[in-house]
Amino acid sequence: MMNNDNWWRWGNPNEAQNLKDYPKLIDHFEELWSIKLKNNFKIPDKFEIPLPSFTLEDFKSIFPKLKEDQFSNSNEDRLKYSIARSYHDILKVFKNTIRSYPDFILFPKSEEDIKHILNTCNNNNIKLITYGGGSNVTGATDCDNSHEKIAMLNMTRMNAMSALDDESLTATFQAGIYGPELEKHLNGKGYTLGHFPQSFEFSTLGGWIATRSAGQESGLYGKIEDMVLRLKVLCPSGSLEHQDFPKHASGIDFHSLFIGSEGTLGIITSAKMKISKLPGSYNWTVALFKDFQHGSLAIKEMVQNGIHASITRLSDAEETKILSLMSHSEKSFAKTQIEKWVKARLIKKGYDRPCLLMMRFAIKQPSDKMQITDAKAICKKHNAKILPSNISSTWEKKRFSLPYLRDTMIEHRLLIDTFETVTYWSNLNDLYNGIRKALAERSDFFEKKGLLFCHISHAYETGASLYFSMIVPQEKNQELEQWKQYKTVVSDAISELGGAISHHHGVGKDHQQWYLQKLSLNAQKLLQTIKHELDPKNILNPGKLFDATKR
Amino acid sequence: MMNNDNWWRWGNPNEAQNLKDYPKLIDHFEELWSIKLKNNFKIPDKFEIPLPSFTLEDFKSIFPKLKEDQFSNSNEDRLKYSIARSYHDILKVFKNTIRSYPDFILFPKSEEDIKHILNTCNNNNIKLITYGGGSNVTGATDCDNSHEKIAMLNMTRMNAMSALDDESLTATFQAGIYGPELEKHLNGKGYTLGHFPQSFEFSTLGGWIATRSAGQESGLYGKIEDMVLRLKVLCPSGSLEHQDFPKHASGIDFHSLFIGSEGTLGIITSAKMKISKLPGSYNWTVALFKDFQHGSLAIKEMVQNGIHASITRLSDAEETKILSLMSHSEKSFAKTQIEKWVKARLIKKGYDRPCLLMMRFAIKQPSDKMQITDAKAICKKHNAKILPSNISSTWEKKRFSLPYLRDTMIEHRLLIDTFETVTYWSNLNDLYNGIRKALAERSDFFEKKGLLFCHISHAYETGASLYFSMIVPQEKNQELEQWKQYKTVVSDAISELGGAISHHHGVGKDHQQWYLQKLSLNAQKLLQTIKHELDPKNILNPGKLFDATKR
C-alpha cells in the first residue's frame, strides 16, 4: 500500500521540526558521541497489512443504526490506529514490526451510537479499544495479536460542551473533545479548565481521565482526578452515572473506579469538570540552584507552606545544559543568559552544575503577588540566584512542541524516550540517584555516553514527580532490544525504589508488569470482579491493566 | 438493671451543661413559645434488656485467641452500644424504645485480633458492627432488630501512631485513635492533621474515614478523603492494601471505595494520612452582612479566587441572633458587640437581619497576611461591615462543646436536631429557601414557632455546605413521630432540590432511603457485587447503605 510519509508523526505534520535547526545541540551530540548525525532513518515504503476481515457489508449488517461515514476499514486507517505515540510505537513503524492491526474503526456521534456499538460488539464478540487523540505513550491502545475482531472506537466526534455553570464554575463536556477546543469554549467566557499536558493539542478529555493525566499547571489546578465532578460511563452491562456534589458524605464514590481505568471498565462519554477563572496576569520567577537537591528542597518548602506556583519546573544539571543548547541562535536564551552568567560569576562559587527552576504564578488577587516575594525568599534561603524572568520564554514557547523534536531525533537514529514517576519527598533523592545508578550498573547506557536528564514538574505537599529523558545513539538493527533493555532497567529501578510506575502517562502495555507486581492478589481479584460485573464478556480493551480472564 | 444516669450523654459527663446558664436563651425561648421551660424529661429508671444470649463461655470457645478483657456482654455495655448520639438515638433512650441490643462487644488490640474475629464471625454467622467513638448521628451503628447475633467491634484500643515522615508530611495511625490523641502525637513535633469535626474529642480516625467526615478547618486542610494516602482494610475475604504515592497514574484506586463505606465493606485498621505544619499564628476576621445571600456571595468570591480561610462560618440572621443570645452574661459578646452595634448604627441602613461571618486564617508566610486584606476587601465589596475580631472568641471556645447544650435542651423537652447538605453555588439560595418553604408547607414546624437556623461552614470553589439546626418544643408522647415528620420533610426537600443527603454526617440508617433514591439500579448492582466479593456472607454492618441481600 502507499502511505503518506507523515502519518506516524506527532501532531500537525506542518509543524514537523528538523534537528538541523538546533545547531548547538547537534554539535554537542556529535562531539559527545563522535558521530556525524544523518537524517537517514526512514519508514518502510510499504506495510504488509492483512486484508480487512471485516467489510463494509459486515458493518452495514451488524451496525444498522450507524451511518457509512462512521466506519472505516481502509488500510490507511488500520495502519494509523495500530500505534499511538510512544518511542516503542514509532520504532515499530520504522522497523516494520507492527503485527496487529484493528479490523475496523468506528466513529460514534452520540451516546445512543455507543450503546448500539457496545450491544453489538458484546453480542458478536468484537473487542473494543477506546481511542481519543492517539497521543498515548504506554501502548494503552495496542491491538493484541489475536484472532478476535478488534474495533477502535474513535471518540473525537463527541466533542460538545453540554453545560456551563458560571456561578459554580463547572462545565460538562463530551469526552472526545480535544484540549484546544475545550479551552476555546471556556476562555471566551473568562474560564479555563487548567489542564495542559504536553499532549494538550492532540489529546482528549476522556483520554486524560482514563489515564489519570496531569497537566503542566497541576500546582494550581490539580491533576485531572481533582477536577472531575461527575462521569457518565457506558458499559456492556449498562450505563453508570451518579449524582454529583461539590463534596459529600453520601456513601461510596464508585465513579472514581473509572479514573485511570484505561478503557477496561467502561466508555467515559461525558464529564462534568471543575473549571476556574482565568487569572488576570502571570508572573514568571526563575532561579538557579547549586544542585538538584537544593532546588528540590526549595520546592518542598514552598508547597509545604502553601505557596503554589501554577507551573513549577526544576531541571537537573544535565537538563539545564540541554535547555541551554536548544536555543536556535547564538544571541538567545542560552548564550546571553544562563551560560554567560554561570561562566562569569558562579563557577568560582561552586555553581558549576547549575539547576534551573522556572515557576509561573497566576495572579488573581493582590496577595498572589506577595506569594512571589515569599517564593523568592525561600529560593534565596536555599542559595539560589534569581535570574531574569524572560529566561523562561523559550520553554514557554515550546511547552507543547517538544514531541516534534523527538520525531526528528528518531530520524537521526537517536533513541529518545521519556519515563516518569512520583514519590514522597523523603525518598526523592534516593529514587533520583537510584535510577541513574541502575542504568549504570545494569545496562550499557552510560558506556554508550547516553544522556539522562530529569526535571521535577509536579510538586505536592507530600512529594513530587520525576520526569526523565534519555537520549543515546540507536544500536543499528537492535533498536527495539536496546530500548527494551533500558526500559526494563529503569522500570525495575522505579519499582524497587518506591516510585510509582507512572505519575501521569498511565499503565498501558508497557508498564503492565510493574503495575501488576504491586497489586496484591486480593486487589486483583476485586478488580476482576468489578470488571466482570461491568464487562462480563471482556470486550473492553482486553488484556490491559489486569488479566480479566483469570477470574 | 441499674444505670449510671449519665451514660447516654455527649462526651465527658463532667462537662455536662445546663440551659439555666444561658438566661438570655431561656428568656427568648419562653417568650417565643409562651411556656415555662422545666428540666423534667428523664431517662427511664430501668431498661428491659433481654438476657445475654452470648456468654463468656461462648466467647472463650469460639474466640480462643482473644483475652477475657477483650469481651463484654454486660447489660450496661449492651445498653451503651445500642445507641450512638443522634437526637433520634437519645429520644429512644428517654422514651424507652430501644428494641435491639448488640449481643456482645469485642475490643481488638491488633490486626491479628481482627483477622481472628472476622474469621470466627464469618464461620459462625455473627454480624459485626465497627464502632469508633460512638458519636455518629445517622444511626450508622444501629443494631437491626434481628434474630442473628450481633457483635460490636470497639476499635479504640488500636490507637498507635506507627509512622511519621516529617520530610513528606505523612503519618500513619491505627484507625481507633481519638482526635485529641492523634493531634497530641503531631502537635508536639510541630504538625497537625487539621481535621476538627465538632465531634473531634469523641470520634476516631477510622470513623472519620468510614463516614467521609469534614472538619471545621476544611477550608485549609480539606475533607478527610483529601488527606488519606493509604488504607489498610481487613475484609472477611482477606486483607486489602495498596502501595501509596503522593499522586500517580498507575491504574485504578480501589481504596477510595472504603471512604464513606460505613463499615459495610471492610474494617479500616490503619491509615496513612497527609499532615501539615502547624501555622505560626492565626487571625480571626469577622464581618457582618446585610443578609445571607450577600455573605454567601462574598464567600464564593473568596474561594473562587484562591483565598482560603481555614475556618469559614457564615450564620444566617436566625443563627446570628441565637449566637448573640448564647452569651452567659450581659457584658459579653452579644450585648456589647453585635446587638448594640446593630441597634445603634445599622438598622436604619437596612441591616436589621444581620448575618455574621467568622473566618480564621492560618499564617505560615507573609503572603498569608495579605490574604486577609484581600478577604476584607471582598467582604466590603459585598456591603459588609468588618467587626472586632474578638467576637469570634465565644464560638471558638465552644467549637467542640455545643452537643452538651443539646443534651440539656432535650432534658427541657425541646426537640433539637441538626441536618446538613451541600450543593453547587448556583443552587445554594434555592436549596436554602426551599428547605424552609418545605417545612412551612408540609409540616407544623413554623406553626409551632419552631426555630430554624443555618450556617455555611464548608466552602469550595464549586459550592458550599448548609448546616441547619432546628429547635421547637417537643410534642409530648409524640416525640418520635414529631421528629420523624420534620426529618422526612427536610430530607425530601434536600433530595428534591439537588442537595446531597449529607455533606459530612454520613448515611447510616436515617438517610438510607434518600441515599438509595439517588443510586441507579446499575450502581446498586455494582456495589452489591463489590460487597459480595469482600464480604460474601454479609456479616459487616448488614443492611446499611445498600441491601446486599438483593444481589
Image: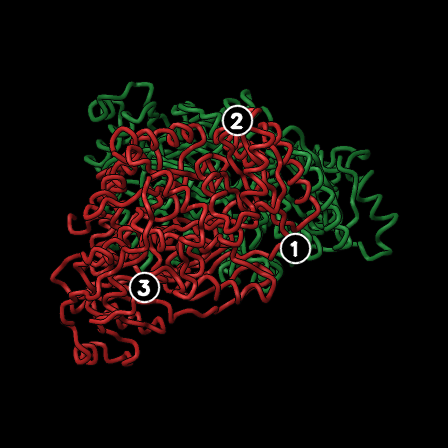
Chain colours: A red, B green
The quadrant in which the C terminus of chain B is found is bottom left
Q: Is residue B81 visible?
A: no
- Circles 3 and 1: CB atoms closer than 8 Å: no
Where does the image place residue A442, in percent across and percent down from the top left?
A: 25, 31
Q: Earlier in the sequence, mark 3 or mark 1?
A: 3
Marking on residue B183: 2
Secondary element at tag 2: helix
Q: Mark 2, residues whose alpha carbon is within 10 Å: few (<14), some, or many (≥20)? A: some
Secondary structure beneath label 1: loop
Q: Name above or below for residue A91 compared with residue A384.
A: below
Quick one: B427 or B192, which is closer to the camera? Answer: B192
Q: Is residue A137 above or below residue B244?
A: below
Tell me, yes or no, whether dots 3 and 2 are on the same chain.
no
Q: Residue at x 16, y 69 (%)?
A: A124
User: Given the image, on which type of amino acid does mark 3 rest?
Assistant: Leu
Helix, strand or loop at mark 3: strand
In-image side of A288 versus B520 (left or right): right
**Rendered location of residue B357, percent (x, y):** 70, 46
The chain to which mark 1 is attached is A
Quarter of the figure with the N terminus of chain B: top left
Q: Position of residue B65 (x, y in %)?
A: 24, 21
Q: Amino acid at mark 1?
A: Gly
Return the mark for residue A234.
Answer: 3
Which mark's residue is nearer the viewer, 3 or 2? 3
**How many numbered discs, if any?**
3
Quick check: A68 left or right of B204? left
Distance from disc 3 to disc 2, alpha carbons, whole Å, reads: 44 Å
Q: Pinpoint the chain carrying mark 3.
A: A
Q: Residue at x 53, y 67 (%)?
A: A185
Residue that carries the numbered disc 1 in the rendered image: A280
2 vs 1, front mark: 1
Residue A18 appears in which quarter of the rendering?
bottom left
